[in-house]
Image (spheres, rainbow, N blue to C red):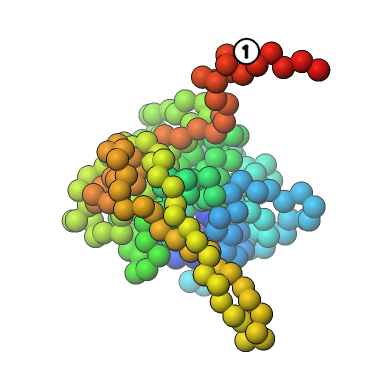
């Protein structure tokens, strides 16, 4: 199995190292990832600048290709320019920070996997729901299990898997829940600060609302200690609204 790995935390992040090391048990791994932190770039691609690609070493060995682009750029580059064979699987992560609820839209991690799905390849995004003291081990092990599923299983065209894990040791994880995206909004605000030169700047921060009434959501699964796995898609059309919009009888 040929596996392409990317992330949005950058090729030198801890999470992608854990993922690439673990996935070597499931196949041949090629890493193409941003050369620096690119979190929350969503599905951005680079069209006005060249894309530089340089070999990246970790632990004194060749690890992968560091690119000046975004996660979506990296997946395109990997498939169309770097890998000799088309990958059988694209895996993006392991992200430091959960990608549940509306975070999916902003996430570079998810967009790396979305690009894989757009190009017709089974794709998985995997994230760890913490920003402090991450233990990537259980997520890396789960990624291997999931990758092996693709020896016999398929995803519908246009569908990818968005996986999130709570930051718990393996023995404390309650199980795996198939979930839907939470519609709970991130409650964000701006901290207003002053820089050393006396100028004002703002830094966005926030958290999720404490209650999500949707018991099947990714957010609730994580809060209850479960691995959350959500099938997601990128066709943004609201089919239900098409007949009503036609009834607007818009004319030139
Ligand atoms: Mn990230």
Residue 120 visible in the picture: no
Would residue 185 be found to the left or right of residue 167 on screen?
A: right
Q: Which residue is located at x 57 percent, y 64 percent?
A: 37
In the rendered view, tell whether residue 163 sits above or below residue 160: below
Which residue in the rendered view is the most extreme toward the bottom? Answer: 196
Q: Residues within 10 Å of mark 1 (few under 14, many from 20)?
A: few
Q: x and y percent of residue 187 in the render? A: 44, 55
Residue on which disc 1 sits: 247
Q: x and y percent of residue 171 in the render? A: 18, 56
Disc 1 residue lies near ligand 1 with CB under 8 A:
no
In the rendered view, tell whether residue 64 sits above or below residue 197: above
Quarter-of-image position of residue 243: top right
Q: Which residue is located at x 62 percent, y 73 percent?
A: 201
Quarter-of-image position of residue 85: top right
Q: x and y percent of residue 66 in the render? A: 62, 61
Quarter-of-image position of residue 129: bottom left
Q: Secondary structure at mark 1?
A: loop
Would residue 178 be found to the left or right of residue 117 on screen?
A: left
């Amino acid at each position: 199995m040929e596996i392409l790995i990317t992330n949005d935390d950058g090729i030198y992040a801890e999470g992608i190292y854990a993922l690439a090391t673990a996935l070597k048990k499931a196949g041949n791994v090629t890493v193409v990832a941003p050369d620096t932190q690119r979190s929350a770039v969503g599905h951005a691609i680079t069209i006005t600048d060249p894309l530089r690609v340089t070999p990246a070493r970790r632990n004194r060995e060749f690890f992968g290709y560091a690119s000046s682009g975004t996660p979506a750029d990296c997946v395109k580059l990997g498939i169309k320019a770097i890998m000799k064979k088309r990958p059988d699987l694209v895996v993006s992560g392991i992200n430091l920070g959960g990608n549940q609820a509306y975070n999916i839209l902003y996430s570079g991690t998810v967009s790396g996997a979305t690009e894989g799905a757009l190009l017709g390849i089974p794709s998985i995004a995997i994230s760890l729901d913490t920003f402090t003291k991450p233990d990537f081990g259980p997520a890396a092990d789960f990624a291997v299990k999931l990758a092996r599923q693709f020896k016999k299983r398929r995803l519908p065209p246009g569908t990818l898997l968005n996986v999130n894990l709570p930051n718990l040791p393996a023995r404390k994880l309650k199980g795996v829940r198939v979930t839907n995206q939470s519609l709970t909004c991130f409650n964000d605000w701006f901290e207003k600060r002053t820089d050393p030169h006396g100028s004002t700047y703002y830094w966005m921060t926030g958290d999720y609302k404490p209650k999500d009434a949707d018991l099947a959501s990714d957010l609730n699964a994580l809060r209850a200690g479960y691995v959350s796995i959500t099938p997601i898609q990128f066709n943004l059309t609201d089919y239900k609204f098409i007949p009503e919009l036609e009834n607007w009888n818009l004319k030139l």
